Amino acid sequence: MTAATTSRSATELAAAIRAGDLRAQDVTEAFLQRIAAVDDRIGAFIEVWDESARREAEAVDRARERGADLGPLAGVPIALKDNYARRGFATTCASRILEGFRSPYTATVVERLEAAGAVLLGRTNMDEFAMGSSTEHSALQQTRNPFDPTRTPGGSSGGSAAAVAARMAPLALGSDTGGSVRQPAALCGVHGLKPTWGRVSRYGLVAFASSLDCVSPFAHHAEDLGLILSVIAGHDPRDATSLTAAVPDYVHAPEPNAQGLRVGVPEHLFDDALDPAVEQCVREALAQLQQLGAELVTIKLPHAGAAIAAYYVVANSEASSNLSRFDGARYGPRRSGERDLDTMYEDTRTAGFGDEVKLRILLGCFSLCSGYYDDYYLKATKVRTLIRRDFATAFEACDVVACPTSPIPAFTLGEKLEDPLQMYLCDALTVPQSLAGVAAVSVPCGATPDGLPVGLQLTGPPLGEPQVLRAASAFQQATPHHRQEPGL
C-alpha cells in the first residue's frame, strides 16, 4: 500500500480521494511511513507535523463522507520550506536567530493550500534565509541528495526537492530567488517551477530579496505543477506586488504538445563551463522536442554573462535591508546587551547568523554605501534592465527558451564551501530568468553516466506559465526521465 500510494502523482491522488477510492488518512499515513523509513538518510525534514497532518486528513475524509465539496488538493500531502509562516508553528529559515520563534499569522499561499484541503506534512531544510545553492548553509542539519547521499541536493530549497525526489511528498513548496527551486529540481530529478514574479503572493514568505523572491513548487509530474499553481496563484491585497491579472486554467489546459512550438536555443550558453554529460542530455532533449514537432530557433541573450554579478549586488543589497529586522529585540534569542543596545544587536546577530548570511549582508551594505551606490547597485539595476530586454527580444522569435538548468550535476558535499564564487556560479543559468521576472520550469531530461539527474530549463515570457507547462508536459509524456527513482 505505501509504495503504491507514494509513487502516484498528486493529480492521481486528488482524484482517487475525491472518488472515494482512497482515504486521505491512508494516503497521509503512507507518506508519514515513507518519511520515517528514509529521511534519516536524507535529512529533508526539519520537523514533521504528523499529528496535525493526521487531523487534516481525517477532516477531509469526514467532509467527503457527508457529501461536501472537496478542494482541488483535498487529502494531498504537501511539504513546506522552512521560510513560510504558519500560525502557531515554528518558522526558522534554518537559522539560529529564529530559534524558538512561532509565527502569529499564516502565509497567503499556506492559507490557500489549507482551503484547498491539502495535508501539510512539515517543514523542510534549506540554506539559511535561502542563501545558498547546496543546502549546506543550514544551521540545523545536513540534507543529502537521494540519488547519491554523498552529494548535495542543491539549494536553497534542497529539503523540499529531496522530499519530493525520495517520494516523501508528492508536492512541496520552495522559494526561488535566483534558482533556488529550479537548480535543486534539476539535481534531484524532479520538476520545479518559478512562476512570473508577482504571480503568487509573497505575504508570509520570509523575505530574502523582495524584487526577486518567488513562491515556487516542486512535483514529480508537470501536470501537478499546474494543479498546485491553480490553487496558489492570484492577486492578494496583502501583497502590493502581487499581480492583478486573471489566473488562467492551468489544470484543464489544451492537450500538451510541442507541435509548432518555437524553442529558442541560446547556443552561446553552451560553453566550456557546461559539464559534458549535462550538455549531452540537454542536446538530446532538444532533439526530442524537435521530433515532437517543435522548431529550434537560435537566439541570443547578450547580457546573460553579466547576470551573476548583477544578481549578487541586487539580491545582497535587498537582503541587507530585509534582514535588519532580526536583531534580538523582536525575534529569536537575545544575546548580551548588558552594556548598550548596539552591543546587544552585535552579539545577537554574530551568534545568530551563519557565515554565508553575514557575508551577504556585508556585501549588500557595501553596495549601498554612499560613494559606492552608483558603481554597484545602480549599475546592477541597469544590467537587469538589459537582461529583461534581451528576453523580450528573444520572445519575438520564439515561444520558450531552452537551456540547461544547472551547468553541472550534483556535486560532492563540502566540495564548494571554501570557494563562494564557484558556488555562486552554480546559478549562472537560472539567475537571468530571475532578474527578468519571467516564468521558468526545470524538467528532468536524463542522467549522467553516474546516474545523477540532469535538468532542462524551459523559460517563457511574463505570465507565460501555460506555455512552459505545455512544453514540459509534452516532453514528459514522450520521455521516461521523470520516472527515474533513487535507490533508497
Image (tube, grey):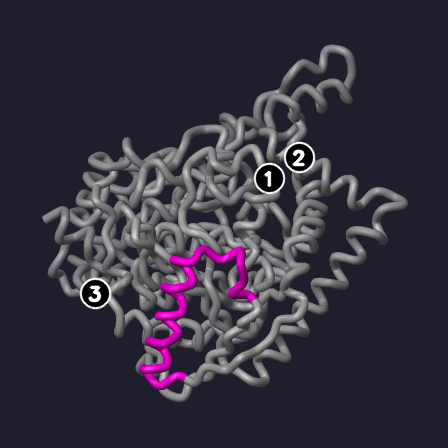
Q: Is residue 102 visible?
A: no
Q: Residue 326 at what x, y percent from top left?
A: 64, 32
Between the residue at mark 3 and the residue at mark 2, the CA separation in whole angstroms equals 47 Å
Q: Is residue 285 above or below residue 343?
A: below
Front in this rendered view, residue 54 or 445: 445
Kindly indicate whether the residue at mark 2 contacts the one at mark 3 (C-beta within 8 angstroms): no
Quarter occupied by residue 342 = top right
Which is more N-terminal, label 2 or label 3?
3
Report the magenta residues as a range. Answer: 269-294
Circle 2 residue: 359
Between the residue at mark 1 and the residue at mark 3, the CA separation in whole angstroms equals 45 Å
Kindly indicate whether the residue at mark 2 contacts the one at mark 1 (C-beta within 8 angstroms): yes
Q: Residue 96 at what x, y percent from top left?
A: 53, 27
Between the residue at mark 1 and the residue at mark 2, the CA separation in whole angstroms equals 10 Å
Front in this rendered view, residue 345 or 24: 345
Residue projecting furthest to the top: 338
Instruction: Tell me which amino acid carries mark 3.
Output: Ala
The tally of labels here is 3
Q: Nearer the viewer, mark 1 or mark 3?
A: 1
Circle 3 residue: 15
Circle 1 residue: 420
User: SS for tag 2?
Assistant: helix
Quadrant, the C terminus: top left
